[in-house]
Image (spheres, rainbow, N blue to C red):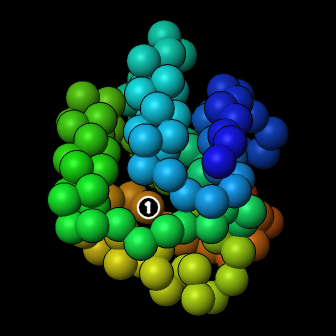
Amino acid sequence: MEYTIEFNGEGPSDLTITLRGVGDPDTVARCNTEFASDSRFRSGLLMLVDLSEFESQPMTETEAETAIKRIQERDWDHPVAAIAFVVADEQAAHEFMQWRARLGGSRSHREVFTSRADADAWLATQRAK
């Protein structure tokens, strides 16, 4: 699995993260630590997370709880304005919506899209708020 982190990325996002390849909880955690510890990471960002070439793998309940705890801690310290996730297809969107629900559903300011254009359009509306 590989990832890229781009601050002031293209489009309406302040931070664009792209994950590619077969999911690996340790690499995802390393990515999270890397961008969250960057001095440019702050509260109020608009984030785009491109998972369109990411293949998630089943996690144990312990792995899932650990990942969710990391995200919740990051959100507590630096709440983002909005996060748009781009996934490969409707099946991936359905699966990812389960993660979104565990993180607070629509109150988490996260949305899931199967189109980068739709994700960018939604982020643009969030900037206007």
Q: Which residue is mark 1?
A: 110
From the viewer's perspective, tell me whether residue 68 is left or right of residue 9. left
Q: Position of residue 53 (x, y in %)?
A: 74, 62
User: Which residue occupies the foreground of this view, 54 or 60?
Assistant: 60
Provide the secondary structure element on which disc 1 rests.
strand
Residue drawn at x 55%, y 58% as measured from the top left: 23
To which quarter of the image does residue 46 belong? top right
Question: Which of these two is toward me, 51 or 107?
Answer: 51
Q: Position of residue 105 (x, y in %)?
A: 30, 71
Task: Pick whichever, 35 or 31, lies toward us.
Answer: 31
Q: Is residue 117 visible?
A: yes
Q: Nearer the viewer, residue 126 or 114?
A: 114
At 46% from the left edge and 32% from the top edge, which residue is drawn? Answer: 30
User: Residue at the location (49% across, 86% down)?
Assistant: 94
Q: Amino acid at mark 1?
A: Arg
The picture places residue 73, in percent across and down from the top left corner, at 21, 37
- Residue at 68% x, 42% y: name it: 2
Q: Position of residue 61 (x, y in %)?
A: 21, 67
Q: In this image, 98 relative to 129: left or right? A: left
Crowd class of label 1 (few under 14; some 14 to 19; many from 20; radius 10 Å):
many
